[in-house]
Image (cartoon, rainbow, N blue to C red):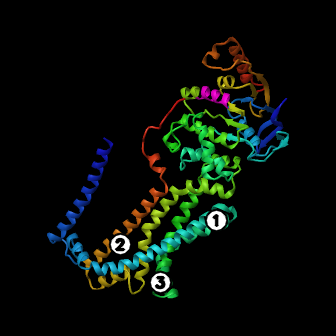
Amino acid sequence: MDSILEAKNIKKSFVRLHTLENISLHLNRKEFVTILGPSGCGKSTLFSIIAGIALPDQGDVIIEGEKYTGIAGRVSFMHQKDLLLPWRNILDNVCLPLFLKGINQRQAHAEALPHFALFGLEGFEKYYPAQLSGGMRQRAALLRTFMFSQDIMLLDEPFGGLDALTRQTMQQWLMNVMEEIESSVLLITHDVDEALLLSDRVYVLSHRPAEIRKEFRVNLKRPRGLNSFAEPEYIQLKESVLACLTDRPSEE
Amino acid sequence: MKKWRNTVDHLMSAGVGVLFLFLWEMTGRLQILPAYLLPPPSRILLAMVRNADLLWQHARITLLQAVVGFAIAMLLGCLLALWLDYSPLARKTLYPYLITSQTVPIIVLAPLFAMWFGFGILPKVLIVVLVCFFPITISLMEGLATVDKELMDLMHAMDASTWQKYRWVKLPAAMPSLFSGLKISGTYSIMGAVIGEWIGGRMGLGVYMLRVRQSFATDQVFAVITVIVILSILVLKIIQLAEEKAMPWQQHDQSQEEPVDQQK
């Protein structure tokens, strides 16, 4: 297996909350993997640990064979909120990770501008975030994530704050973008359709304390689109994922 | 439609002012109140025009003291706020004293300052600094503290240094709060200088005000008050102008324009 990122036996408890119980997962090169779980099961905590901004009680994060537990700045991280800086235009926002690495403004702009067309932001370089719609802001946030680290991206419910229609357009759009770029992506969502549409593999998490209940392989042919929803293979897969997701342990 | 609404609001507001001035003028014209107690606006205006040179001589000194004091307060206030934000230990130890210091009325300190530092410009500037310092410190501290936590997490995930976190996120995010503090301080600064001048000195609007009051030239007292108001508004306007220049993105936030969308 050509695994680029691996999380091994991650455990994490907060004062009175046992959040993560022995989570192990891996992400292969150029693979799109989704972590699907009920709300509040600790998915975001898991991401904070993988991104290195939180420490696990136990377990390790391995990236390209090296230990990265608690070391921030290796993978890029996108939140549900766009978190664009209101005081900077879109171009500068997108370049922020480059500025933080000490690259000067002219060079950073030159590096970012070629990607504007692919991310549907061409012509909006000088706009402030407040002037753009939610969907466009999310695309800018994704481009910023991409500018930080192109090989591994963590997306934490990137479309969770959007309305249903925009959300669907964005999913289709992200799928097309993934064809163009060579990134490995780990996505968090609680939307089964989103997971199946985008992923190569899906991990289903249980309620707190979260552990991996099952791993699904999504073999639907690409490119996938709205018509994929009608395929029998899709429907079957969705049913088993949903069953796995809603199947609570008997003591609850 | 909205613009029209705005104009009506402005007219209403101006109308109230005009009506107020008219009624005030009438109290004098109809001799309801004697002019040595409450001179009508026309007399005040006349007093201002006649003494324009003298008023300007004194106003210059007051303005200088206010601006110097304000600048020092801004520098000290910002530095202290940054330090207290950066170091939790400093915040915990010093913050209670900072709050307590504000319960001491500045006006009672003024005579002490005159005793310690004489009747020159120094005690006046010090009073302005003390008056202006607190609102600036508190507003910048609050602005720095209320930055979106997720945004700071993102900066952490992108491995930003402390200086970078301040430069890109914390300082710009604190700007609106800082400017509301600056506006409060700015209007206080003129008042602070005048209070300082009441204690004694040779020049300044406060000094001049005491002189004309002692000679019962009520219209001139009012003239001085008017100048103080005008100066305060002037300082406020300059700060507002700086605010617009410093935060060009604010205009877009406030305008209710429809966000642009471009679906791929």
The quarter of the picture where residue A145 lies is: top right
Q: Which residue is mark 2?
A: B228
Q: Is residue B39 left or right of residue A188?
A: left
Kind of residue indicated by mark 1: Trp
Kind of residue indicated by mark 3: Pro
Image quadrant where one finds the C terminus of chain A: top right
Q: Chain of mark 2?
A: B
For discs 1 and 3, the disc positioned in front in the rendered view:
1
Residue at 45% across / 64% down in the picture? B184
The quarter of the picture where residue A217 lies is: top right
Q: Secondary structure at mark 1?
A: helix
Q: Chain of mark 3?
A: B
Q: Chain of mark 1?
A: B
Check the image and report above or below for B142 versus B8.
below
**Mark 2 / mark 3, whichever is N-terminal:** 3
Q: Which residues are magenta?
A: A170-180
Residue B193 image point, x, y percent = 43, 76
